[in-house]
Image (cartoon, coloured by chain):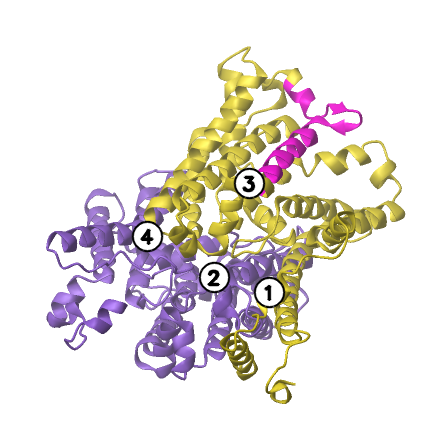
Chain colours: A purple, B yellow
Amino acid sequence: MSTDLETTTPRSYASYTRPVWWRLLLSREAAVVAALVAVILWAIYFVPFFGNQLTMTFLLLDVAPIMLIALPMTLVIVTGEIDLSVASVVGLSSVLLGSLVDHGWAVPAAMLVALLAGLLCGLINGFLVAYVGLPSLAVTIGTLALFRGIAVGLLGTKAVTDFPQRWTSLAKAEIGGTGFPVIVVPFLVLALFFALLLQYSAFGRGVYDIGLNAEAAQFAGVSVARTKLVLFVMTSLVSAFAGIYFTLRFSSSRGDNATGLELQVIAAVLLGGVSIFGGRGKLPGVIAGVLLIGVLSSALRLQGTTVNVINIIIGVLLIASVMSTSVLAWFSDLTARRHNRGRNQSGPTTLAPAGVGNPKEVDR
Amino acid sequence: MSDLREKDHHVSDRTDHGLVSATDQLVAPSRMSPGQRAFNTVVRSREFSILLVLLFVVAAATLSSHSFLFGGNGWRDLLLTPSILLLLAIGEAVVIISRNVDLSVGSVLGVTAYLTGRLFIDVPGIPIVVVVLAGLLAGALLGLVNGLLVGFGKVPALVITLGTLYIYRGVVLTWAGSNRINASDMPSSFGDLGTASLVTIPVLFLVALLVLLVVGYYLQTARGGREVYAIGSDPAAAVLYGLRVRRRVISAFVLSGALAGLAGVVFAARYGSVSSSAGTGIELQAVAAVVIGGVAIFGGSGTVWGAAIGAMLLVTINRALPTVGIPDFWQQALVGALILGAIVLDRVLATRRARRLVEARDEEPGEPVPTAGATA
């Protein structure tokens, strides 16, 4: 920091001297997209039946809940917070939908209640994090247990499997004969919405500001607390929607639906190049990250690999993707020193990981 | 905010005039006798209030059903059931105090629980001590992997241990497949350990208690233990002070892994049957126990005593719910509410303490305060 003040040259970002296409090519997102393309090509050529239309349909059907939740989760992680309660919101909304339909409610009305419950869950998370100032990691571990507990408590070991045919087939329907399931439409709408929100709105730029330095963002006029509240509400709302989809797709409403999904969502988001320290990350990378996990597990399953190995691969990918940043930083540090540029790029050491935050920073 | 700034101003005024600064007053020696002080420390501590809640839960459950405490296995189960979570919570507490988190303990437990059974099957006649040591060692090794990745990768422990949670579970799933270790596969002397008692206290609980005493004493008194607190309250300051942060963090993860490994052996002894899903999801319970026990999630404060009582409380509530007439499906919801309550309480207490310190600084007796009217 102090070296910045001493230099007399106007401050500029080294990478911005290069043309746009060069910068895009070297970005973290490009690496994920390249990996995705490579895996798809490998799968098409070497995995039997992967090129089928049916495979793609099922891949998209399976990966849809993760994809949907990953969108708002990206924004939450960019602010330096984290939401571990999403899978429990999925479970709660699934149970509400199921038990209300079981009591003779119409499906749209039950859906509305499920979405409202999601809204409420988000308000609880957001209020505790943004206005009470509690670390989101602790809050959402608590609400993970709370929301899941309510879901399990409401339904016990029962399962509701009787849903109107019209709705369950809608969840699995394809658009025309293209092989794309209907769930792609709401996903695209939401993806467009969140991408525009994050990249082209004052609110979205504020999200990055908060992630880089919440205090500075506050002084720059970003309403930190309100932004966080809105993000947590949006995350839970989308999770509730994913819960509705999940229920109808499998025609099953159980208390333990989608247990552990939060880890897959977070793994996908981090794989997509979002920094766990906040302030960095883009949606295209995240979508590629989700698809990468989806394609990989689908291809491996077609090859006869068991779920266990896929678990290991997801874990290794997650660690490798976050480690690559520090390994790259270490390398560029090394070359910088060799070229005697004398710039310390090893990154700040005081950054707190997502959801833990700095207790002093939280104090307002 | 403006209030604060004015107070700072006063302090600097006074030091300018060569007067004593306000902080001298705050660290004045207590006028109470050592015994009184110790009593006050214990009674006012966070751990004591959780202990009261625990006693209350036990009392309430015993009142509604006599057998909860006095029935055939009541007393034994009260101590025996929490033993596994107790071990996990001790290790997790040390890691969280160092401002990290270990989400992989459930998977480590799964690996070593299966390893325990496998050893008994593959190496007939193997002594139990060797199996326990193998479990400890395997856990420590997995913890070392976590520690090295966190220590050298400059990546938050949350992400690393989330990854190793997947990997270790994948390893045990691949290794075990759909195999199951049954009680008949293990020597009966090992199975007896799970139910054996010493003066009505189960042996497994004594093991957990011993670990608790050693780790608690070390954290409280040893230099290494105090350094863990220093690292947790401000990692950057700890580096500047010359503490070997990386080494301490790695050791914390090794300890957590080793205790999870021991918990895996205890799991096998207690339940007699081990499948590949042993310990799935228990990591959240461990974190919950630690948080309920008063260890701040951002490190630097709390004790393993509290974490241990938190673990006892969690398990006891779980067992008490059916006796007081609440279906145990609601147990998880209650755990969630408890975690939220614990962290909100932490917040309220911290705010109150900060306010009291500010007030104490202001109400310094015998000092002429130039503009007292403005702050009042």
Structural distance between the alpha carbons of marks 4 and 2: 17 Å
Structural distance between the alpha carbons of marks 2 and 3: 21 Å
At x 69% / y 54%, what residue is drawn? B46
Which percent across, then down, holds residue A323? 31, 49
Chain identity of mark 2: A
Task: Confirm whether residue B71 shows in the render.
Answer: yes
Q: Which mark is residue B200?
A: none
In this picture, is A4 found above or below B85?
A: below
Q: Which mark is residue B91?
A: 3
Q: Which of the 4 quarters of the picture holds residue A346?
A: bottom left
Q: Nearer the viewer, mark 1 or mark 4?
A: 1
- The amino acid sitting under disc 1 is Asp
- The amino acid sitting under disc 4 is Val
Q: Earlier in the sequence, mark 4 or mark 2?
A: 4
Crowding around mark 3 (Cα neighbors within 10 Å: few <14, some 14 to 19, many 20+) is many
Secondary structure found at label 4:
helix
In this picture, is B98 found above or below B127?
A: below
Q: Residue furthest bottom?
A: B373
The reply to whether the C-beta atoms of the residues labelled 4 and 3 are less than 8 Å apart is: no
Q: Nearer the viewer, mark 1 or mark 3?
A: 1
In this picture, is B167 found above or below A97?
A: above
Secondary structure found at label 3:
helix
Q: Which mark is residue A355?
A: 2
Magenta span dominant secondary structure = helix
Magenta extent: B190-219
- The amino acid sitting under disc 2 is Gly
Crowding around mark 1 (Cα neighbors within 10 Å: few <14, some 14 to 19, many 20+) is few
Which percent across, then down, holds residue B245? 41, 46
Q: Nearer the viewer, mark 2 or mark 3?
A: 3
Crowding around mark 4 (Cα neighbors within 10 Å: few <14, some 14 to 19, many 20+) is many
Which residue in the structure is indicated by mark 4?
Answer: A322
Task: Confirm whether residue A101 shows in the render.
Answer: no
